[in-house]
Structures are given as C-alpha cells and as structure tokens.
Amino acid sequence: MPLVAHNDLPSFKRLLTEGIKVLASDVAHHQDIRELHIGLLNMMPDAALSATERQFFRLIGESNPIAQFYVHPFTLKELPRSEQAQQHIDQYYETFEQIREQGLDALIVTGANVIGPDLENQPFWAPLIEVIDWAHENVTSTLCSCLATHAVLQFRYAQKRVPQDKKYWGVFPHQVINHQHPLVVDINTRFDVPHSRWNTVSREQFELAGLHVLAVTDSNAVHLATSKDGLRTIFFQGHPEYDTISLLKEYKREVLLFINGQRDDWPPFPEHYFASYEKAVLNEYRYRVLLALDNKTDLPVFPEDLIVGHLDNTWHDTAGEVVGNWMGLVYQVTNRDKRLPFMEDVNPEDPLGLGYA
C-alpha cells in the first residue's frame, strides 16, 4: 500500500517518478485505511543522506500490508553536518522529541560513518542508546541496519564487533536456516544481499547473545537475526536496501581515495558484483589512471555511464518480501487505537506465538 507524502520531502517526488505509489496527505485522510507510522533514524553521512531515505522509503512503500505508511525521518543533532545537509534536515526532518511525543509503530535505524575503531567514542553513541532504549519500551519493532546492528549488539548484549583483515564487500549468496519465523515466509530459501563493512559480528556472537539467526552466507556470516522474542528488534548486518548502483558508487569513492593519495592500493572489486564486461572496462580505466598519474597528465573520467546499464540487481525482490513480512507482523501486533508496544492479549515475551518465551 502507499506511502503518504505528509510533507514536502523531495524523496517523495523522486519515488513517484520511479513508479512507487505515493499519496498526498489530503487524499490519505479521506481513506478509511489503517495507518502505520514508521520512524527512520538516518545517521548516514551527508553524501548518502537522501539516497538512504529513498532506499528505505522504497522498501516500505512496496510492502504489501493493507495500510498507509507515514515515514518520519529524523537524525541525531550530535552528528556533524554540512550547511546544505543541515538545511535539508531542518526543513524536512522531525526531531527525536517530536518522534517521542507522537509515538511510532516501528523504527528503522541506519548505519553511520565511523571514525576510529571504537563505537563508544563516536558522537552518535550516547544519543543512539537513548533512542534504542526508548524504542525498546515504546515501539513494537525496531529494525537495525549494519552499523546500528553492531552498536546494539555491543551496548545491549556485550558482543563487540571484530575488525577484519580486509573489507567485506560485494553481493553474497545467503541461505535461510530458520524456516519457522514469519519474517522469512514465502521468500527464496537462497537469496543475495549486498554487504560493505570492515567489521563483523559472528554467528557465534549472535547466538551467545540469545538471538535467533535466520539467514547466513555460505561462509556462515550472519545477515538476518531477531531478538529473543522474535520481533522487538530485527537485525540486518548486510544492506538489502542498496540500489543497483550503490556498490559502484562505493567503488568509485575508493578509487578517488587512491587517486588523492588517501589509500595506498587500488581497491579490489566488490565480490560477485561486476561481470566480465564491467571488470574489463574498469581495468582499462585503471591502466589509464596509472598512466596519467605517472605522466602527470589529465585523469580520465570514471566510466560510470558505460557500466550502469550492465549491472544486475539480485537482491531487491527478497529485500522487499522481508520488509513486507516485517510490516505485516507490526500490523498484526500493534494496538490499532493506541501507541503501545503490544496489544493486551499478546504475550510480550513471545508476540508471534513461536514458543520463544
């Protein structure tokens, strides 16, 4: 069912051009359809702020419960922002105080840019804990993405992420290992998910925390898990919200870091993402860049236009199904008349009746 454009956020207009159904708020008010209010705590850096909005809005808007979705973006004032990004936030985002006052049915928490190895030293650390603690008591379900998953595993479950020798990035095959949970009902038993991270929380750590692991890669890396009760917190360690070109954009940024002397080596390709043609184009580009650097001549333009049309997206359908299942569970469990975590006739320790209590 549709997203509701309850303000002038530019992402709504962008999604309309993509064919996503978006209702004007005055039209939505005249329809007798259940509302679901979803918060989006967007902690991504300025360059990815709007793209991250669209990625999660798109997944919510394509989900299938019979509901109108009001998505409320907000961020943390402690995160440093450029003047332009701050203007966007001031104009279109809500504050946490407003979010807390009006209440939510569900919450999505994105990743963030991290400087240094320790999460507890990041500017978002204390305010993020405040938001998560509030949501735990007042919101039916919170979905944590990538870095947010690592943060919650650390401060709530004492499971600290582990640095890796190299960046784990690419599009990786996954397998459902817990078919009982309704989050994975009617999705492919094997599916792809993009990952992009320097740190990981292992399957053993998830299980030591008492969490339910639902899907892992062939190398046993966890993507999808839930809290002990099965719904209060959903964990993504990958990035199923990514656009088809997201990893290409990341690869381009890594190349520019090399060109500007901010990394020592040419970046490796994201795994299982580029096919032979794209690799050939990028290898030719690399040769021309290195030649230009040696000869101190003009650098060639990154061949993005030659590559974009050849990239495949092998993860979006499954991502939409998982988010649709999640929205359906939130729809079932929330009290339709009050902003309360669970209906009175639902066991908060096992709201889905899975025998987890």
Image (cartoon, rainbow, N blue to C red):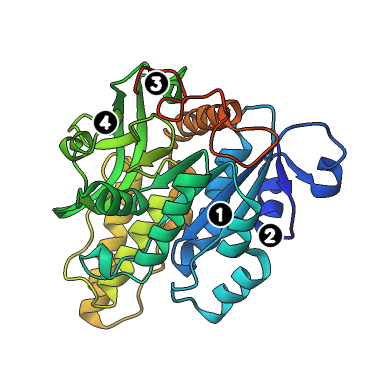
Residue 89: which disc?
A: none
Report the residue marked by disc 4. 216
Mark 3 or 2, closer to the camera = 3
Mark 4 lies on a secondary structure that is strand
The amino acid on which the numbered mark 3 sits, given as a three-letter code, is His
Is residue 99 something that shows in the picture? yes
Report the residue marked by disc 2. 9
Q: Mark 3 or mark 1: which comes first in sequence?
A: 1
**Are the residues at dot 2 and dot 1 in contact (C-beta closer than 8 Å)?**
yes
Q: Is residue 131 above or below residue 315?
A: below
Spatial separation of the CA atoms under disc 3 and disc 1: 28 Å
Q: Mark 4 or mark 3: which comes first in sequence?
A: 3
The amino acid on which the numbered mark 4 sits, given as a three-letter code, is Val
Q: Is residue 304 above or below residue 354?
A: below
User: Residue shown at 38%/30% (left/top)?
Assistant: 229
Residue 295 lies in what quarter of the image? bottom left
Q: Residues within 10 Å of mark 1 (few under 14, many from 20)?
A: many
Report the residue marked by disc 3. 181
Q: Is residue 196 left or right of residue 78?
A: left
Q: Position of residue 310 (x, y in %)?
A: 44, 42
Report the residue marked by disc 1. 53
The amino acid on which the numbered mark 1 sits, given as a three-letter code, is Glu
